């Protein structure tokens, strides 16, 4: 799965994000979701771990999924920026694709800008975090993250 993701013509990743993916350290569940999205969407992935400003925990003490290779930040879909207004159709489509995944197969946390959440419409929002803080912090990208695997400490 990882080789297919790295070789996908739809992957447009920063050097740091590509290196993180190529390291083999990225959570396999996240790789699976990204590969699924890449099957029909060109994604600009800016960050996984390398370059993220926080260590293992946020200033509030919350575990930072980026630090543990369990998160990815998508800044554009099919060449259209997540921050564009009105929200581009491709960006909405990617969100709806995520919403259509069965809960056990999707990322556990999805955050993004408030206008994007509003544009998604009805559907299963399990894992989607749509609140003022999350929307402000993720005003220009879609953040996908996996929860820590059951039975593991911070890793």
Image: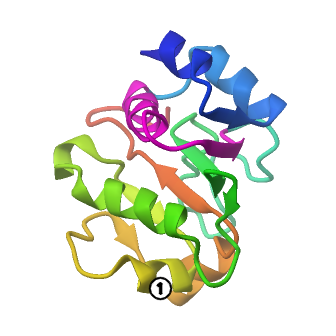
Colouring mode (rainbow / by chain / secondary structure / one colour): rainbow
- Name the residue furthest top: 3
Q: In which quarter of the view is residue 20 placed?
A: top right
Q: Which residues are magenta?
A: 28-48
**Does 138 appear above or below 71?**
below
Q: Relative to residue 120, is residue 135 drawn left or right?
A: right
**Does 57 appear above or below 84?**
above
Q: Residue at x 25, y 66 (%)?
A: 126
* Residue 99 location (% of width, % of height): 28, 61
Tell me the quadrant of the picture where the N terminus can be found: top left
**Does 47 appear above or below 53?**
above
Label 1 Cα neighbours within 10 Å, binned few <14 / some 14-19 / many ≥20 = few
Q: Residue at x 65, y 61 (%)?
A: 58
Q: In which quarter of the view is residue 136 placed?
A: bottom right
Q: Nearer the viewer, residue 82 or 137?
A: 82
In magenta segment, residue 8 = no
Secondary structure under tag 1 reads loop
* Residue 47 location (% of width, % of height): 71, 44
Q: In which quarter of the view is residue 152 placed?
A: top left
Q: Relative to residue 151, is residue 110 drawn left or right?
A: right
Q: Residue at x 80, y 52 (%)?
A: 53
* Residue 63 location (% of width, % of height): 53, 53
Q: Relative to residue 2, is residue 6 drawn left or right?
A: right
**Does 124 appear above or below 76?**
below
How many labels, in total? Answer: 1
In magenta segment, residue 47 = yes
Instruction: Name the residue that disc number 1 marks.
Output: 131
Q: Residue at x 65, y 14 (%)?
A: 23
* Residue 100 location (% of width, % of height): 23, 56
């Amino acid at each position: 799965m990882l080789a297919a993701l790295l070789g996908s013509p739809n992957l447009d990743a920063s050097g740091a994000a590509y290196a993180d993916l190529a390291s083999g350290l990225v959570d396999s569940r996240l790789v699976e979701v990204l590969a699924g999205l890449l099957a029909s969407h060109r994604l600009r992935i800016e960050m996984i771990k390398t370059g993220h400003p926080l260590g293992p925990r946020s200033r509030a003490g919350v575990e930072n999924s980026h630090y543990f290779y369990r998160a990815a930040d998508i800044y554009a879909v099919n060449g259209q920026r997540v921050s564009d207004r009105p929200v581009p159709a491709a960006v909405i489509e990617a969100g709806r694709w995520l919403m259509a995944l069965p809960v056990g197969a999707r990322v556990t946390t999805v955050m993004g800008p408030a206008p994007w959440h509003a544009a998604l419409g009805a559907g299963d929002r399990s894992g989607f975090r749509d609140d003022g803080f999350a929307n402000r912090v993720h005003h220009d990208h879609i953040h996908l993250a996996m929860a820590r695997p059951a039975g593991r400490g911070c890793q």
